[in-house]
Structures are given as C-alpha cells and as structure tokens.
Amino acid sequence: MSASGLVNEELQPSPTPSQPRPVVGLAGVGLLLSLVGIAGMVAAALRLRDYNSDGLVSTVVGAIFVVVSLYPLFPSFKAFQGDRERAKLLSDGHLVAARRASAAAREEAQIAMGYAAAAIIVAGLLLMAFANGGGVAHTFFTQSAWDKSFGEMIRAFWTNIWVAVVAQVFVLIFGLLLAIMRMLPGRAGAPLRLIALVYCDVFRAIPAIVTILLIVFGTPLAFPSTAQWPLAWLGIVALTMTYSAYVAEVYRAGLASIHPSQSAAARSLGLSYTQTLRTVLVPQAVRRVIPPLLNDFISLQKDTALLSTASIAEVVLVSKLWESNLFNLSPITLAAAFFIVITIPQARFVDYLIDRDAARRAGK
C-alpha cells in the first residue's frame, strides 16, 4: 500500500458504536399482556366463585390467582424505568452504561411478557374449565365422585404398580438375552441371530394390546394347565414379550457403542467371549443405556392400563366401572392422576441421569 493510502486510512474516522435502541415498545407489550392476564384471572376468579358453593374457599383461591397474576407488572415498570435511564445516560454521553441499561430493560420486558403469557394461558384454561356453568369441571373434576371411588381405585392401582415392577425385571433379563443373541459372532451364531431378529421385528410390529388379548385369552385355551393362573400373571407375560423386543434394541445399541478395542483388549488377555461380555462389555453398556431403559419402563408403566381390555382388575377397569355407576368421568380423571403422580418423578429422574452423564462426558 502506498504512503498516501496509509495517510488516508489514518485520517478516516473510526466507526462509532451503535446507540442502544429504545425498549419502550417491548415494555408496552409486556404491560399490555400483563393487563390482559390480570383481566383473565379476575374473570376466572369470578367464574370460580359462581361455580363453587363454598364462597370462602372460592374467594380465597380466586384472590390467590389474581395476586399471582399481578407479578408481571413489576418487570414491566422496571423496563420503562430502564428505558428512561438509557435515554438519560445517552444524553450525558455514557454510551456503555446506556447499553447496559438497555439490555437490562429489555430482559425485564421479556420477563414480563413470559409471565404474562403464562397467566393468560392459565386464565384461559380456568375459564374453559368453568364454562357452561362449570360443565368441564363437573364432568372431569367432581370431588364427590373422587371421594366415593378413591379407596377402591388406589387398591386397583397397586395391581398396575406390581405388574409393572415384575414385568420390568423379566424384561431386563429377557431383553439382554435377546441382545446378546443378536450379536453372537460367526456362522455358529447365525441361527440364533436370525431368531432374535425375527422376534424383535415381530413384537415391535404387533401392538401391545393385541399381544395382551392373545396371551390372556389364548394361553388358557392352548395350554389348559394355565387356566388356573391369575390373569395378572398372563398380563405380565404379554408385557414382557412386547417390551423385551424394545429393550433388546436398547441393549444392542449400548453394546454397539463400545469401541471394538475394548473387546479386543479383553480377548488378548485370554478372556473368552462369554467372559468378555460379562466383565467388560455388558457393564459398560448397561451404564450407558440406563436413561433409555427408564424411558421404556415409563411406557411400560403406562401400558399396564391396557390390561383393562383383558378384564384384569387394574385401575382403568375399576375407574370405568365407577364411571358407569356415577355417570361421570371424574374417576377416569383420578386414574390419570395416579399415573401422573408415579410417572413424572421417573421422567425427572431420567433427565437427571442424562444431565449427569453429559456432565461426566464433558469432564465437569
């Protein structure tokens, strides 16, 4: 570059940082959404008071909803205040401080919009629940129906729990056996690999409800000696046959994820193929596949409800009987609540295991 070019480049002014944009628009949107959420909560509280015969309880609950919905107003006002601070700092020539104030105000406006949107959604759900004179609430959430059916349904739900636990134990064992069969090496293992492949393909293709019907109703006819078995045990057999196919694929993915050098090193130390599986490959694979295994077990827990189609006295069948007696769907909603209570902690535990494994891999 010539000397004149260098001089011209030095004489050019350096670009000035852009000024922070006003946040008053975002703050206004946050304030507007906050007011809509408050109005919705007030309407829901009034609808609740009209629906519930206990005026004191409904008034207290409605007041709590309204007070909670007031929260988005505070970040909205903070956003307006931050925008005024940004303008003052700009007028004084403090550009960096103005940018910080603008960023803080923008964050407060976004917080207001997020919480206000949540309040609007909750208010909408409450209004829908108490619409038509409380038709939705009366159909699905009747307290008297819950009181009448709770005792019998909680005993029936115990059937769902122990069926799921026993089936999970069998699935772990049988699924691992299928996965090992699918990974047997050489021509000698080809027939067993084919059998395991066909089994997994077939039982992943058949819906679980069809397997339950075939096993529960067909097994006593095909094998008369099983006619005296409790139906719940036949349901366990059906669930085990279905979910073993899924779990076998999970195991196989875990075994395949282990680097071949692990197996080669074990074999070079004189371990047999069986010893390599038992002491090297399977322990590592099981540790890696625990989260997906737990996800399958959550699905298994929910699919115990399918046993109602085979007249097994679990919680869904009992809830349907109560629904027929009361002409109300609240017992079925209670059955759904039982599954929610037992399933959500398992889902959160799976998330914890996934996060812990990710942190371990990242070296944290």
Image (tube, rainbow, N blue to C red):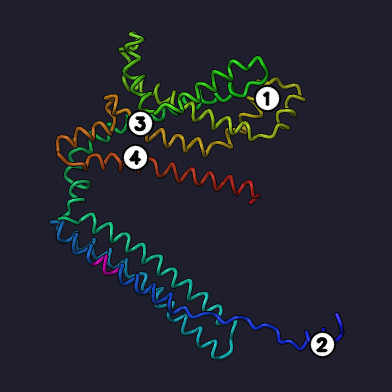
Question: Mark 2 or mark 3: which is in front?
Answer: 2
Disc 2 target residue: 7
Q: Which mark is residue 276?
A: 1
Q: Amino acid at mark 3?
A: Thr
Question: Label 3 near label 4: C-beta < 8 Å?
Answer: no
Q: Amino acid at mark 1?
A: Thr
**Crowding near the residue tagged with mark 4, few <14, some 14–19, many ≥20 C-alpha atoms within 10 Å:** some
Disc 4 target residue: 339
Whole-percent x and y of residue 143? 19, 47
Question: Label 3 near label 1: C-beta < 8 Å?
Answer: no
Q: Residue at x 63, y 17 (%)?
A: 189
Question: Mark 4 or mark 2: which is in front?
Answer: 2
Q: Which mark is residue 332?
A: none
The magenta segment: 38-42
Q: Residue at x 25, y 35 (%)?
A: 153
Q: CA–CA distance between discs 4 and 2?
A: 77 Å
Question: Mark 1 or mark 3: which is in front?
Answer: 3
Disc 3 target residue: 304
Q: SS for tag 2?
A: helix
Q: Amino acid at mark 2?
A: Val
Q: Amino acid at mark 4?
A: Phe
Whole-percent x and y of residue 157? 30, 33
**Crowding near the residue tagged with mark 2, few <14, some 14–19, many ≥20 C-alpha atoms within 10 Å:** few
